């Protein structure tokens, strides 16, 4: 017999599930791309990127062979670039070790770079119909509420227990785990909401929900204290040399490796200090400096608090030998150089649209 809440949940999904581009295919590569993009990014934001990415890189070979700058440009605006770097590493592994075919089993998928427990379960179940749960924040929240579980799901042990519980669920004869996992995703994002009150009156499994019966939905899941983020203050310099702007490549190691940025320095500089800093890295003379809006960017463990200056230099030599700066016009930066969204406020100020235009290659 099918487990109590599973049937109504699947029925609801089959009639009211979201119509998303990656649900029109069973191609494991496409499902994999969507699942990686959906990690840490909202569905609405992913839609446009998904189509564009697959148009440029329609298969495993294209992804495996894509040059780094072009790959980063396709990802520009999505953030967490390690996702796409790992996806490329994994594509190369799939080509070398699996004959170019995405492996079907969760136990194999999980060995690939960037594919964790959740993503492996999602790909195995959605693309290959394997009976694998995919436990993410949505599943944790929903199950914690329907069973009123006062557990700390940040612990690996509790997450494992939850996965084992899900494995005991029986599905109706015509049901499959791909649909059940996606039903959890849809219920979690549209009905059993995390921060605002859940919309229990619209919930297809309300009658099975222990927390709802007691009116204590918001007590679940139990929240664990997070470590506060480290604050890093910095000054960003929008340096103009004639009709070009200065950018530079970030180091290959550390945060946002190999992406491009507007020159910046640690700490908050005064106008005078910013002029000195700009002159030192360009070997040009500053004519004018203007304060531009401050900006913040939140990474998972760090927050950047940025002060910005636009600095106009006397137009001059672009090839100062001690400098790592590249001078490019705004349109060229928009087309060719992947700039992380941490700098969106400054790109906007310069009329550079990040993540909007396709790369200039095909
Ligand atoms: S009844 Fe409410 S709390 Fe329970 S699963 Fe449904 S939406 Fe979530």
Image (cartoon, grey):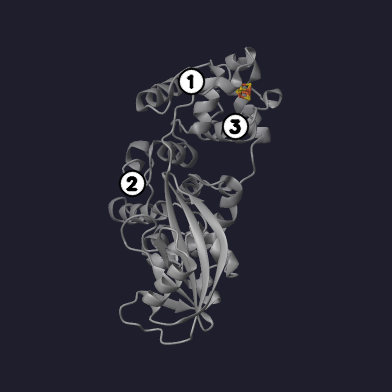
Where is residue 124? Give x, y as percent: 43, 38
Res. 52 visible in picture: no
Q: Residue furthest left?
A: 97
Q: Is residue 255 rendered to the left or right of residue 337?
A: left
Depth check, front residue: 217 or 172: 217
Where is residue 52? Give x, y as percent: 55, 61
Quadrant of the picture in which ligand 1 is shown: top right
**Which residue is located at x 31 percent, y 50 percent?**
98
Kindly state the secondary structure of the residue where label 2 is placed: loop
Could you tell me how far apart the alpha carbons at marks 2 and 3 are, in whole angstroms? 33 Å
Kindly state the secondary structure of the residue where label 3 is placed: loop
Nearer-N-terminus badge (1/3): 1
Depth check, front residue: 46 or 3: 46
Q: Nearer the viewer, mark 2 or mark 1?
A: 2
Where is residue 281? Give x, y as percent: 37, 75
Where is residue 303? Give x, y as percent: 45, 48
In the depicted structure, whether residue 113 falls above or below residue 64? above
Q: Are marks 1 and 3 in contact (CB under 8 Å)?
A: no
Q: Which mark is residue 195?
A: 3
Q: Which residue is mark 1?
A: 169
Quarter occupied by residue 204: top right
Q: Which residue is mark 2?
A: 112
**How many neighbours does mark 2 have within 10 angstroms: few (below 14), some (14-19), or many (20 or more)?**
many
Could you tell me how far apart the alpha carbons at marks 1 and 3 are, in whole angstroms? 27 Å
**Which residue is located at x 59 percent, y 32 percent?**
195
Quarter occupied by residue 153: top left
């Amino acid at each position: 017999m099918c487990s109590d809440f599973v049937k109504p949940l699947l029925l609801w999904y089959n009639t009211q599930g979201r119509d998303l581009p990656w649900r029109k295919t069973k191609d494991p590569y496409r499902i994999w791309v969507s699942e990686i993009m959906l990690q840490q990014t909202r569905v609405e934001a992913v839609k446009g990127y998904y189509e564009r990415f697959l148009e440029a890189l329609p298969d495993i070979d294209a992804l495996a062979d894509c040059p780094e700058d072009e790959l980063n440009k396709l990802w520009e605006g999505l953030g967490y670039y390690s996702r796409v770097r790992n996806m490329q590493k994994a594509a190369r592994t799939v080509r070398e070790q699996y004959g170019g075919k995405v492996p079907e089993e969760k136990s194999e998928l999980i060995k690939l770079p960037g594919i964790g427990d959740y993503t492996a379960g999602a790909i195995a179940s959605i693309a290959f119909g394997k009976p694998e749960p995919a436990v993410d924040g949505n599943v944790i929240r929903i199950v914690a509420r329907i069973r009123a579980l006062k557990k700390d799901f940040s612990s690996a042990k509790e997450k494992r227990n939850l996965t084992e519980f899900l494995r005991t669920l029986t599905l109706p004869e015509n049901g499959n785990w791909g649909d059940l996992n996606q039903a959890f995703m849809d219920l979690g994002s549209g009905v059993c909401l995390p921060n605002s009150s859940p919309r229990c009156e619209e919930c297809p499994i309300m009658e099975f929900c222990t927390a709802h019966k007691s009116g204590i939905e918001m007590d679940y899941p139990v929240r664990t204290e997070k470590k506060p983020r480290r604050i890093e203050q910095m000054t960003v310099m929008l340096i103009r040399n004639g009709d070009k702007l200065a950018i530079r490549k970030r180091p290959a190691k550390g945060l946002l490796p190999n992406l491009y940025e507007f020159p910046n320095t640690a700490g908050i500089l005064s106008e005078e200090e910013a002029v000195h800093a700009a002159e030192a890295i360009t070997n040009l003379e500053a004519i004018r400096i203007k304060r531009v809006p401050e900006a913040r960017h939140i990474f998972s463990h760090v927050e950047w608090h940025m002060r910005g200056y636009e600095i106009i230099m006397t137009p001059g030599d672009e090839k100062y030998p001690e400098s790592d700066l590249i001078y490019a016009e705004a349109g060229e930066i928009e087309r060719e150089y992947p700039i992380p969204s941490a700098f969106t406020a400054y790109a906007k100020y310069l009329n550079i649209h990040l993540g909007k235009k396709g790369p200039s290659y095909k």
